[in-house]
Amino acid sequence: MSSFSNFVVPLVSFSLFIIFLFKWFSHPDSTARKRLPPSPPKLPMIGNLHQLGLYPHRALQALSKRYGQLMMLHLGSVPAVIVSSADAAREIMKTQDLIFSNRPKLSIPDKIVYGSKDIAFAPYGEHWRQVRSICVLHLLSNKRVQSFRYIREEETDLLIQKIRQSSSSSTSVTNLSDLLVSLTNDTICRVALGRKYSDEAEGSTKFELMLKEIMELSGTFNAGDFIPWLKWMNKVNGLDARVDKVARLFDEFLSGVVEDHRNRMQGKTDRDDSSNDADLVDLLLEIQRENKSSFTLDDEAIKGVIFDMFGAGTDTTYTSLEWTMAEILKHPKIMNRLQNEVRQVVGSEIEVAEEDLEKMPYLNAVIKESLRLHPPIPMLVPRESTQDTKVMGYHIAAGTQVIINAWAIARDPMQWENPGEFNPERFFKNPTNDFRGFNFEYIPFGAGRRGCPGITFAMAVNEFALAKMMLNFDFPLPIGVNEWDMSEAVGSTVHKRNPLLVVATSPSC
């Protein structure tokens, strides 16, 4: 009996060991069967967070040169895949767009935008589909953008007047950055809310400070999102209090706007109501009132959409226009060619008409090149995978954040000749290369389901303002300035670090 036990026990143990090994190596979740993207070494608890630096788009580009176009980082406890090539971006944003259409939950936007009931930060699902459909079909369609043409014309004329007033002599310096902020803020206010708040001294200051605080908070690194046990720090450093305060103030502001519009609509008859004069709040309330589908557009969703109009409409639009002007001023030959094109198209007419923009291919190329070098949100808004999948042969687990470095992709020497050079003519060589999400080597507005729906509106504002400035002014270097400053500010939206100070003079010919 003893000899039998001595034989059976080792045999059973060996058999169980073989079964265990077989199960281990054949299990679909076994790490031995997974091929993960390459990853730099990480530190305990913080992972690779220390490697992001002040300018993550630049730091990630440098890391990608060593670890590849698809790279895995560990941002605290959050796994994140970094995409740094057009091929990898196409796989994420086109081939597997549905799998990567979710948004990670970020605590600061989630608090400000009513539990992410807007478009930009909403999780992928029925709410997001319905709200985005409303924006695409009703708020930001080509027809609707054209209906706001008179607002763009009036606000751009006002910009030209302000530049003239601040340029009383050939040595007067104008803070063009401030004027471009006013242009975009006032345009969005009129389009979205039906009025602008810069006409009221006290109201204007509060409104601008509130928007500035929101933009700063949106770009603030929140350690609690990546290292959950550090959430307590937000109470100590005051971040939670700042977010709660600005969320409450903006909600009070938007609630007042919605209520004013609702009261005004109730005082109108259908005969009085003219869709041509309706702003975006009017349109949203009309959709809410009609309620022709099972989807309910509540007040929080309306306020969330309006928040996106300001967040995406003002900050990114003004930033792209500011960088475009900075690049033009840095390259006098390009500015001269652009001025000549605008002035030849306008001819004997006094002002630019929006129809003239179609005859200005160089102006369009200048803006495209500026967006290539300076995408307003260089790493776009993060995505998140909804299921396990493979990308370019690498395993990506469900719940992995995906960060697409649009800035690095647009400077990839494999895709662009002399990528660091500002050269608008490159878009004449490849005129089909556009920023609407079909060319993945050039995605300043993103692509796929999560691409920005406001491209047409942003471009209408930028092209018209740039043409008007090129028609009406020359911009010599200010006295004492040898070259233009092109340094970047820190934040999710990358502005110029220092304001764009210009001397604007009447055209020399």
Image (tube, rainbow, N blue to C red):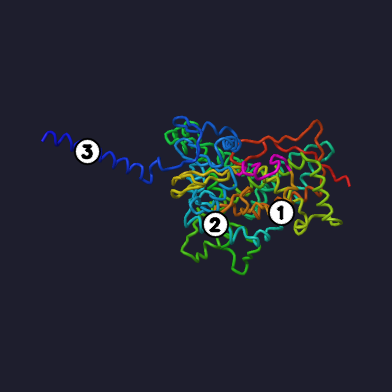
Q: Where residue 160 appears, x then y in whole percent?
A: 77, 48
Q: Position of residue 355 (x, y in %)?
A: 76, 59
In the image, which is nearer the foreground, mark 2 or mark 1? 1
Where is residue 495? Give x, y as percent. Answer: 65, 39
The kind of residue on which mark 2 rests is Arg
Q: Could you tell me which quadrant the N terminus lies in?
A: top left
Q: Nearer the viewer, mark 3 or mark 1?
A: 3
Question: Residue 256 or 57: which is nearer the viewer?
Answer: 57
Q: Nearer the viewer, mark 3 or mark 2?
A: 3
Marks 3 and 2, how far apart in space? 63 Å
In what element is the residue under mark 3? Answer: helix
**Which quarter of the figure has residue 82?**
top right
Picture disc at residue 163:
none
Identify residue for label 3. Answer: 11
Q: Which residue is mark 1?
A: 431
| SS at mark 2 in the image | helix
Tally the numbered discs: 3
Q: Which residues are magenta?
A: 406-422
In the displayed structure, does residue 339 sit left or right of residue 197? right
Instruction: Name the N-terminal-most of marks 3 and 2.
Output: 3
Residue that appears at 44% across and 47% down: 398
Dot placed on the residue nearer the N-terminal end, 2 or 1: 2
Rendered image quadrant of residue 356: bottom right
**Helix, strand or loop for disc 1:** loop
The residue indicated by pointer 2 is 132
Q: Amino acid at mark 3?
A: Leu
Work out whether mark 3 precedes mark 1 in sequence or the reverse, and give the earlier one. 3
Disc 3 to disc 1: CB gap under 8 Å: no
